[in-house]
Image (cartoon, rainbow, N blue to C red):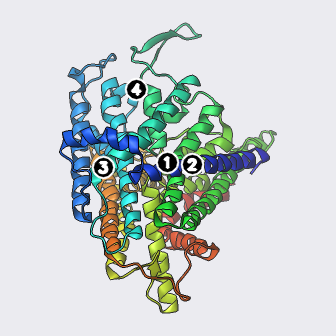
């Protein structure tokens, strides 16, 4: 990495820590009900909805409520897309979205994935963007916060049957965390040049004398929550590479910070709720180490450039050193350092927003975001989802350590027994199953191969990336795959839904089981879960358990492509 790359990374982490620490105090107070003004404002809302705010439920009722809530969200977003031609706030006269695309998009935004097989400015009306997609950006992020808080309550409580009230948790996460942060951030973005308007599209004259249509829209309001909620769906087809979404280097840096802000803060919230801040620091340390290694690897790979182009330059008596590295598919405004860091952040955090074409990265550079997704989106990960995913690996880690020393494994004073390990196994294995089966079906079927324009290992990487992104609810793409077809719309929608709730249901089952257990006092034989040894154990568990499932597939894709690229020169 260059000096500029190191400075950018250090500044990013320093500011992230400075912002996440105070935010964690606010999130903890809100979710615990200690925000007095909030309770007074919430009360009439609960009465109107028939919700008994003081009544908490067990994990099963909590889960059913969450599934019903998100199921209704799918129906609402689907209906908006299918009916948008006859609805208001459609100045460009957008037609109804095709059924398969509408189904895929509805699942995508409800599951916090925001996979887009369409161009936003050419497909969605303002009403659909605001009332459908932006609203789900809030609600899907609130779902992740509610689930992780319920799981952490399971660790903090003992001999209890309840893990919380799902409607209260969703309300508090939306109204007092996501809405205020998004409102402030949207104002900052507008002040820096991000557009926010309901005006019709603008016809502009080009330098050549032609006419170009400039898409307009309420961009800043959707952009703020797409980043803070680790959603990632762009208002425009080019996402955060579009100058109306990302006008400058400053907005680019702020967008990167906003993606990690809530996931980092939730680590401290975890420590506060369980009564030991060191536990939160340990989880955050493991996430940060994995992230820094990935960021360095992606930046280094992109700075090496394409050896085939270097060889061509040498033949033509041009400098073969390629000091600019690999600029293909990157915004000249941001360059390699910012593009590689953004790609690392957005795939580590389950966001999916992009400022560069991951399809144009070098094989090893493209492998970094792919691997981060395949780890289960636990390196900071999505809002809430990253932390509860990492806690699953923590449970797995202490279980493995217990087997090694012949003790019943414990984590935060709770015995980890057969039931918890069954649920952990289901949650960890469901996404690799969806990814590998989906990829195999795509490359072995005519309908799947029809969308692959690039033959060989790169085309395989595109398919593998698509199913990895969908099942792990990231939403970014290599962008070379023609995925807006009935086959991919259906297959990826199924991967997104079961990748989201196939993990959430076992997590909530674990929360209920842990809450019912008694808390055990620490003994000299108890494994400390707040020190460097545990951080190393957690990182090792993530890499060994999370990544080994994908090694053969990675060998067929980016690894083979890397060897072919360099051996050819």
The answer to whether the residues at label 2 and label 1 have Cβ atoms under 8 Å apart is: yes
Label 1 SS: helix
Which is more toward the observer, 425 or 313? Answer: 425
Report the number of numbered marks.
4
Give the residue number, with chain letter if any, for mark 2.
22
- Residue found 61% across the figure and 52% down from its top: 365
Q: Read off the residue under disc 1.
A: 26
- Mark 4 vs mark 1: give the one in front: 1
Which is more N-terminal, label 4 or label 2? 2
Spatial CA distance of label 2 from label 1 is 7 Å
Within 10 Å of the Cα at label 1, are there few (<14), some (14-19), or many (20+) other Cα atoms?
some
Q: Which residue is mark 4?
A: 121
- Foreground of the two, 374 or 180: 180
- Decide: few, some or many residues near mark 4? Use Cα within 10 Å; few <14, some 14-19, many ≥20: many
Q: State if disc 4 and disc 2 touch (CB < 8 Å).
A: no
Whichever of labels 4 and 3 marks the residue nearer the N terminus, that label is 4
- From the viewer's perspective, tell me whether residue 213 is left or right of residue 111: right
- Image location of residue 297, percent across then percent down: 65, 57
Q: Could you tell me how far apart the alpha carbons at marks 3 and 2 are, in whole angstroms?
A: 23 Å
Question: Does residue 167 appear in the picture of this structure?
Answer: yes
| Circle 2 Cα neighbour tier, 10 Å, few/some/many (<14 / 14–19 / ≥20) | few
Sequence-wise first label, 3 or 2: 2
Q: Nearer the viewer, mark 2 or mark 4?
A: 2
Q: Secondary structure at mark 3?
A: helix
Marks 4 and 1, how far apart in space?
Answer: 36 Å
- CA–CA distance in space, label 2 to label 4: 37 Å
Left or right side of 212 for 329 = right
Q: Mark number for residue 168? A: 3
Which residue is located at x 34 percent, y 71 percent? 515
x then y, percent, for residue 17? 62, 51
């Amino acid at each position: 990495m260059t000096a500029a790359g190191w400075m950018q990374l250090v500044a990013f982490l320093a500011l992230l820590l400075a912002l996440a620490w105070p935010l964690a105090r606010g999130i903890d107070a809100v979710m615990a009900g200690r925000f007095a003004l909030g309770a007074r404002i919430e009360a009439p809302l609960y009465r109107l909805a028939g919700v008994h705010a003081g009544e908490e439920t067990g994990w099963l009722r909590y889960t059913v409520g969450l599934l019903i809530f998100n199921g209704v969200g799918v129906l609402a977003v689907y209906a908006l897309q299918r009916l948008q031609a006859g609805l208001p706030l459609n100045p460009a006269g957008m037609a109804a979205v095709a059924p398969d695309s509408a189904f895929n998009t509805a699942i995508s935004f409800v599951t916090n994935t925001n996979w887009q097989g369409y161009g936003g400015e050419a497909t969605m009306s303002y009403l659909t963007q605001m009332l459908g997609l932006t609203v789900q950006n809030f609600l899907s992020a609130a779902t992740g916060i509610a689930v992780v808080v319920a799981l952490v309550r399971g660790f903090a409580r003992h001999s209890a049957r309840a893990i919380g009230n799902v409607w209260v948790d969703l309300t508090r996460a939306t109204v007092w965390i996501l809405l205020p942060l998004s409102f402030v951030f949207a104002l900052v973005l507008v002040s820096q040049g991000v557009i926010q308007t309901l005006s019709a599209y603008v016809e502009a004259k080009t330098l050549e004398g032609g006419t170009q249509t400039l898409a307009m829209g309420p961009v800043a309001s959707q952009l703020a929550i797409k980043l803070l909620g680790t959603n990632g769906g762009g208002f425009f087809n080019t996402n955060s590479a579009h100058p109306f979404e990302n006008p400058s280097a400053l907005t680019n840096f702020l967008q990167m910070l906003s993606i990690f802000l809530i996931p980092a803060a939730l680590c401290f919230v975890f420590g506060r709720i369980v009564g030991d801040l060191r536990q939160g620091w340990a989880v955050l340390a493991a996430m940060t180490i994995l992230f820094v290694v990935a960021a360095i690897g992606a930046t280094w790979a992109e700075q090496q450039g394409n050896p085939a182009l270097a060889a061509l330059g040498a033949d033509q008596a041009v400098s073969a050193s390629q000091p600019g590295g690999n600029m293909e598919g990157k915004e000249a405004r941001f360059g390699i350092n910012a593009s590689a860091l953004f790609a690392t952040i957005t795939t580590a955090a389950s966001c999916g927003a992009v400022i560069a074409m991951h399809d144009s990265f070098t094989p090893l550079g493209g492998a970094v975001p792919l691997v981060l997704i395949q780890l289960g989106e636990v390196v900071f990960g999505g809002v809430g989802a990253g932390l509860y995913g990492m806690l699953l690996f923590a449970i797995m880690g202490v279980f493995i350590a217990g087997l090694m020393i012949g003790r019943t494994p414990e984590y935060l004073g709770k015995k980890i027994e057969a039931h918890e390990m069954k649920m952990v196994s289901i949650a960890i294995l469901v996404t690799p199953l969806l990814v590998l089966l989906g990829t195999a079906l795509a490359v072995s079927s005519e309908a799947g191969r029809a969308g692959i324009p690039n033959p060989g290992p790169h085309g395989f990487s595109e398919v593998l990336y698509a199913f990895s992104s969908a099942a792990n609810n990231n939403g970014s793409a290599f962008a070379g795959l023609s995925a807006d077809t009935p086959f991919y719309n259906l297959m990826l929608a199924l991967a997104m839904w079961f990748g989201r709730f196939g993990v959430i249901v076992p997590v909530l089952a674990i929360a209920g089981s842990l809450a019912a257990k008694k808390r055990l006092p620490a003994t000299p034989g108890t494994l400390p879960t707040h020190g460097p040894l545990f951080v190393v154990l957690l990182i090792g568990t993530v890499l060994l358990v999370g990544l080994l499932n994908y090694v053969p597939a990675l060998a067929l894709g980016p690894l083979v492509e890397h060897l072919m690229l360099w051996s050819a020169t």
